[in-house]
Amino acid sequence: MPVAPLSQKEIEDRLAELPGWSLDGDRITRSYRLGSHFAAAAMVVHVARVQEELDHHSDLTLGYRTVSLAVHTHSVGGAVTELDFALARRVEELAPVHGAS
Ligand SMILES: C[C@H](O)[C@H](O)[C@H]1CNC2=NC(N)=NC(=O)C2=N1
């Protein structure tokens, strides 16, 4: 998979397909709300498993009933790349399993 930094336009085009995700500085981010703290913790474990599978890792924050992600690509100096969007899409797929919105 390519790891070139994406242009602003490329980032905006991809964000348009990912409701809830936005660009915050040099990272793409999203926060999810869940029904309980335990449900949020379970989602964190699920995301961590996917991150290990992809070998791509967000800053992943567990709140009381929230899970927040911020991701960029260290190996290209912290720019946003296709790898960040691949992770975001995988998280979007698993979020409904946890009742996250
Ligand atoms: C050696 C390993 O492939 C790298 O350290 C991976 C691990 N996870 C990573 N995660 C993120 N977000 N960016 C990276 O550049 C990155 N690199």
Image: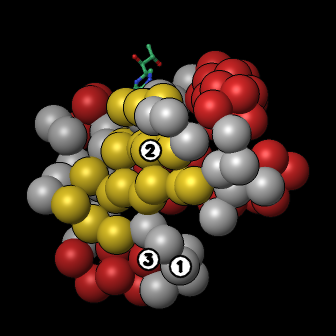
Q: Residue at x 44, y 68 (%)?
A: 21
Density class for disc 2 (Cα within 10 Å; few <14, some 14-19, many ≥20) is some
Residue 48 shown left or right of residue 22 in the figure = right
The C terminus lies in quadrant: bottom right
Residue 7, picture quadrant: bottom left
Identify which amino acid the numbered label 1 is placed on: Pro
Q: Mark 2 and mark 1: span between their CA atoms?
A: 14 Å
Identify which amino acid the numbered label 2 is placed on: Ser
Residue 18 shown left or right of residue 12 in the figure = right
How far across and down, in percent of the image, does residue 6 sit?
Answer: 30, 65
User: Which of marks 2 and 3 precedes in the sequence?
Assistant: 3
Tag 3 and tag 2, C-beta contact below 8 Å: no
Residue 39 shown left or right of residue 30 in the figure = right
- Disc number placed over residue 15 in the picture, else none: 3
Q: How is the image coloured?
A: secondary structure
Which residue corresponds to mark 2? 68
